Image: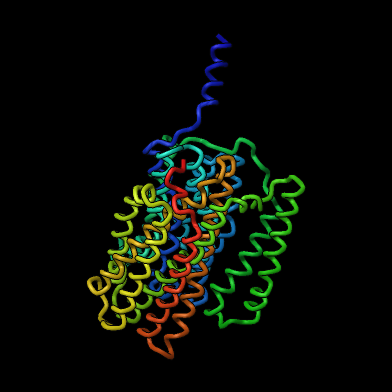
């Protein structure tokens, strides 16, 4: 009897965990929430400023505090999932996300809101890396390819839908909550996700858990903070001396992080970001392409929101709905992505960059000819084409980055990828947003918008050129 039970346990331990359809839906719901919350707050900022008497620099911190905490802790979140179990970290991060969302929605002062947003970003960093790591560890073959495609579709759609949903919620003023509803809406969603996750998400972890790299964690956090904080806060603060000193310190902090990680790798220890991971060509080239794509994506979303509301005079709902064609086309085309990749390989990314560039040109022409009479119909052709182009890039790039990462390092690989994406999202708002707002006083809103779109177009051209370095059919038969 004892031998029979022992053999049953051995077979159970040898059986790899499987992520079913409900489990995949649940982890994708967990992936959507942090990305939605990065963008949902944008349209609520004017109302927050009025209600909480918040200055522009404090409002910047409402956005930057979340993004910086999120980016700084993502790799650590992936490592902790490998060490303690990804399901456990997913559940803990999800619960913390719900509690911090409630704290944001009930914040009595602007600084309380900033603190709650920082905590919300930390909760997101614990939750999100577990999604990709679970997919990598609990799926295989065509199911993994489909799951990765759905993850990419969810990520892109969430970033567009966040701004649309934020406008609708603020305008609806649900039960008199005003801007607070953009945070409080997370609470019932989190409760549902927790209920589903307990029943449907399998536990996975690294076969050889690696201890946390304390020195690497501190230096990575220092490097990201010295870059992201001055770039996000500099314009609102008037570019004081500390912003320039911080930017000057960034290359030294980054070099120190690399030196410590490389030294740990050579001594046989387990660094936070193993340099050997970048020996994977697919990961290295995919990350290089995700950077300009994400910078352009977030910069566009910020700039178009400001231009439509403050320049074209659209309310939050109409400004959000003007982007609806982008969300719809992104969703529809992303569903066809796996079949297109199986047939044409990674050249789909090149085609997507060309489509996105065409969409940006159409949006710039619409702004040039019709300003300030921009609306859903005026922007529809360009937004729809750009959304289709984005859908042919982002999901495929995610698959490229993780295609060669072994399951034992799935948490680290996904953490590195999402950190790169999140940092680029923050950089996009800081760089393209600063460019746009700096041009407005001298050139006016229309010309500033057109010039910023053309600068983004240069980034899209760079993505197209980089995509030519990818093997033409590297994903066609990938597991």
Quarter of the figure that contains the N terminus? top right
Q: Residue furthest right?
A: 267
Q: Position of residue 120 (x, y in %)?
A: 50, 57
Residue 183 location, x and y as percent?
41, 59
Q: Position of residue 192 (x, y in %)?
A: 38, 44
Seen from this angle, which residue lies furthest front? Answer: 472
Does residue 403 sit above or below 68 in this rendering?
above
Viewer-side residue, 58 vs 398 = 398
The answer to whether residue 292 is above or below residue 260 is: below
- Residue at 55% in and 55% down: 122
Residue at horizontal 43%, vertical 69%? 460
Does residue 119 appear in this view? no
Q: Position of residue 277 (x, y in %)?
A: 62, 50
Regarding residue 303, the answer to whether it shows in the image is yes
Q: Is residue 298 left or right of residue 281?
A: left
Question: Is residue 374 shown left or right of residue 419?
Answer: left
Q: Report which quarter residue 37 is drawn in.
A: bottom left
Q: Residue at x 43, y 48 (%)?
A: 30
In the picture as drawn, the residue positioned furthest to the left comes out as 377
């Amino acid at each position: 009897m004892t031998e029979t039970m022992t053999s049953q346990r051995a077979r159970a331990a040898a059986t790899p965990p499987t992520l079913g359809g409900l489990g995949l839906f649940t982890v994708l719901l967990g992936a959507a929430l942090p990305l939605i919350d990065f963008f949902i707050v944008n349209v609520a900022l004017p109302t927050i400023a009025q209600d909480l008497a918040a200055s522009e620099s404090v409002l910047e911190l409402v956005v930057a505090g979340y993004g910086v905490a999120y980016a700084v802790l993502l790799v650590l979140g992936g490592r902790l999932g490998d060490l303690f179990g990804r399901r456990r970290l997913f559940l803990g991060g999800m619960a913390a996300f719900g509690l911090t969302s409630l704290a944001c929605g009930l914040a009595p002062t602007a600084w309380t809101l900033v603190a709650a947003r920082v905590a919300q970003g930390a909760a997101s960093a614990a939750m999100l890396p577990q999604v990709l790591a679970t997919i990598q560890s609990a799926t295989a073959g065509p199911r993994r390819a489909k799951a990765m495609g759905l993850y990419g579709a969810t990520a892109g759609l969430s970033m567009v839908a966040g701004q649309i949903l934020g406008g609708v919620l603020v305008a609806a003023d649900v039960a008199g909550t005003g801007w607070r509803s953009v945070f409080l809406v997370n609470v019932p969603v989190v409760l549902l996700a927790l209920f589903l996750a307990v029943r449907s998400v399998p536990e996975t972890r690294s076969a050889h858990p690696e201890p946390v790299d304390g020195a690497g964690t501190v230096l990575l956090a220092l490097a990201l903070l010295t870059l992201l904080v001055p770039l996000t806060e500099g314009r609102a603060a008037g570019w004081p001396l500390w912003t320039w000193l911080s930017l000057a310190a960034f290359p030294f902090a980054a070099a120190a992080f690399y030196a410590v990680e490389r030294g740990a790798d050579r001594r046989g220890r387990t660094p936070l970001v193993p340099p050997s991971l970048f020996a994977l060509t697919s990961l290295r080239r995919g990350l290089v392409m995700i950077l300009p794509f994400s910078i352009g994506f977030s910069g566009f979303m910020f700039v178009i929101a400001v231009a439509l509301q403050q320049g074209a005079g659209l309310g939050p709902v109409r400004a959000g709905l003007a982007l609806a064609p982008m969300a719809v086309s992104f969703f529809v085309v992303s569903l066809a992505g796996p079949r297109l990749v199986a047939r044409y390989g990674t050249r789909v990314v090149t085609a997507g960059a060309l489509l996105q560039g065409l969409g940006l040109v159409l949006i710039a022409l619409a702004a040039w000819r019709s300003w300030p009479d921009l609306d859903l119909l005026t922007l529809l052709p360009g937004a729809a084409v750009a959304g289709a182009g984005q859908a042919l890039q982002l999901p495929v790039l995610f698959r490229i980055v993780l295609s060669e990462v072994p399951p034992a390092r799935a948490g680290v690989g996904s953490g590195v990828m999402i950190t790169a994406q999140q940092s680029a999202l923050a950089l996009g708002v800081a760089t393209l947003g600063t460019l746009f707002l700096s041009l407005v006083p001298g050139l006016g809103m229309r010309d500033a918008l057109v010039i910023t779109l053309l600068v983004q177009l240069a980034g899209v051209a760079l993505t197209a050129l980089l995509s030519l370095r990818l093997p033409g059919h590297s994903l066609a038969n990938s597991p």
